[in-house]
Image (cartoon, coloured by chain):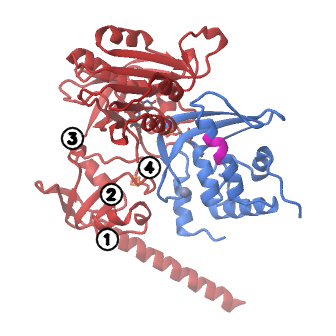
Chain colours: A red, B blue
Amino acid sequence: MGSVVSAVLVLAGLGAFLALLLVLAEKRLASSGPVRLRINQGEPREVEGGEPLLSALKGQGIFIPSACGGRGSCGLCKVRILEGGGPLLPTETPHLSPEEIDNQVRLSCQVKVREAMALEIPESLLEVEEYPVRVEALTPCTYDTVKVRLGFEADAGFSFRAGQYVQVETPIYDGLSEPVYRAYSISSPPSETRFIELILRRVPRGICTTYVHELLLAGDRLKINGPYGDFYLRETQAEAVFIAGGSGLAPFEAILADMAERGIRKKATLFFGAVSRRDLYDQELLREYEEKIPGFRAVPALSKPAPEDQWEGETGLITEVVARGYESMAGMEGYLCGSPGMIDACIRVLTEKGIPEDRIYFDKFS
Amino acid sequence: MKQSPQLQAAQARMAPGALTMDGFLGTDPRDLAEILEDDEGAVRRLGLAHEALAADLHRLTERAIGGFGAPVAEGPFELCACEAMGVLPCPFGEPGLHPKAVIEARRTDTGERLSWTALQVHLIRAHGFYEGRGSPFRLEPPVLARFLGLHPPPQ
Ligand SMILES: Cc1cc2nc3c(=O)[nH]c(=O)nc-3n(C[C@H](O)[C@H](O)[C@H](O)COP(=O)(O)OP(=O)(O)OC[C@H]3O[C@@H](n4cnc5c(N)ncnc54)[C@H](O)[C@@H]3O)c2cc1C
Ligand code: FES
Ligand SMILES: [Zn+2]
């Protein structure tokens, strides 16, 4: 019996010793002093070694998209590491295709900065910056949607293209262990440089939207970063169809304001899909754009109008309403903003009607 | 089942506030390996497989999402999806992003209600994971099987 106990104790001691060695080795490897990062062949920047590349880049004001806060599970934080970075890690391989592995694409949240590195990062991401903002107003649009006006500090210099989005940092509250970032389209026009407006629809038990709808007050301070996205109006002669669901109206409000201000001429129809009248908002604003923008028309459509709605407009799913509206859509462009389900369904309708996929524009994390 | 380092990492991603507000484990004191093992047994005792439960949930989820927020009828079910823009990663850490959608379902014959999320269809199919007890989205396998009308085949 005694020998069994001592064998167990020896094994436990050995285990603890090995664990200690691992911790010491990790510490030694992690605190490797200053390390040089060269980005897109620019001047090398010095960062403190030991931390994940994603946070080292954030420290340099470079924001790589992430939906899992660096936990290695969203696969969004990809960058090309041309030199340095060490061997591919088992936590990275599931997210990388064979082509990406050949192209030295890595997950920046998993790679630790330990040696000099040469990186390639899309130029558009290098333009992304973080901005402190102050909540200037919270205006309800519907029972579950709010418009938030965020004011910049003087000379912040934030600029964007109508249709792009920002990421809002949700600070630590309740049980959150660290801030999380969520994307929101800008609904105000690029000409307005003192503030931006976002339209946020509440998601039950959602981390960011619960914070904004329940805790955020005018006067509070927040951080945003951006701008992001390739969702902007192509200034071609092609007729456009805009399809928005829920808070997906936001980027179209920015695009329409921009069209009106800059006198952009393009035949365009905006279909705004909602369930019942209580989900509609900013209809007056759209009527104003119909006056101001030649060739622009707004079509609200309700999929299940309530009896008290006394709705005389279009009814049905937004996909059905769009399909009814056109014999053929050949030669047109499609712009979509809404839930992933709505986007997928709209792509099917638009391609069936003759719009090639490369003329259908939407923002979707992929 | 032993809690592997991979399951340990997944369990960390399931903590409240990491990927979702409430996390995936609720007040369950068991580790992830135990939860998976216990639910594996529960599903086997029902004479079912995770795949069968996930297949039905998937079909109803797709139908619900197709309503773009309005209620839709499907057999004995009345379904409604609250879908948000954006996607969520799976806490088990393999590739793929899942829409943020909560499905509210009601059986019109029994009046029973159940809700689940689009991510859970994947969690059940790929990992046999029904979330921890006390999680707002925990799906007890016998409750889910009864709700879906999946009865065990005769012995
Ligand atoms: C390019 C882009 C632009 C966007 N623009 C806008 C915009 O203008 N306005 C807007 O309102 N939104 C916009 N979004 C969506 C926005 O980024 C957020 O995704 C949305 O607001 C929800 O965030 P949240 O933190 O509140 O919810 P989250 O906490 O991220 O997600 C909540 C969802 O997680 C799932 N979930 C929660 N708990 C569990 C569990 N235990 N098990 C399984 N699943 C669970 C459920 O599906 C639930 O609905 C945009 C997204 C993208 C990608
Ligand atoms: S940040 Fe999500 S995988 Fe790296
Ligand atoms: Zn998974």
Q: Type of residue at label 1?
A: Arg
Q: Secondary structure at mark 1?
A: helix
Q: Secondary structure at mark 3?
A: loop
Say the numbered circle drawn on residue A108: 2
Q: Type of residue at label 3?
A: Glu
Q: Is residue B40 above or below residue A363?
A: below
Q: Chain of mark 2?
A: A
Q: Are marks 3 and 2 on the same chain?
A: yes
Asked if marks 2 and 1 touch (Cβ < 8 Å), the reply is: no
Residue farthest toward the right in the current orientation of the protein: B155
CA gap, disc 2 and disc 1: 21 Å
Task: Tell me residue A184's x, y (percent).
Answer: 39, 32
Is disc 2 surrounded by few (<14), some (14 to 19) or many (20+) residues within 10 Å?
Answer: many
Chief secondary structure of the magenta portion: helix
Residue farthest toward the front in the current orientation of the protein: A327
Q: Looking at this view, is A80 or A351 the one in front?
A: A351
Q: Which residue sits at x=16%, y=55%?
A: A40
Asked if marks 4 and 1 touch (Cβ < 8 Å), the reply is: no
Q: Quadrant of ligand 3?
A: bottom right
Write down the residue under mark 4. A68
Is disc 4 surrounded by few (<14), some (14 to 19) or many (20+) residues within 10 Å?
Answer: many
CA gap, disc 4 and disc 2: 12 Å
Write down the residue under mark 3. A127
What's drawn in magenta, residue-wise?
A: B58-62
Q: Secondary structure at mark 2?
A: loop
Label 4, ligand 2: CB separation under 8 Å? yes
Horizontal relation, residue A249 to residue B49: left or right: left
Of callouts 3 and 2, the N-terminal one: 2
CA gap, disc 3 and disc 1: 34 Å
Residue farthest toward the bottom in the current orientation of the protein: A3
Label 2, ligand 2: CB separation under 8 Å? yes
Asked if marks 4 and 2 touch (Cβ < 8 Å), the reply is: no
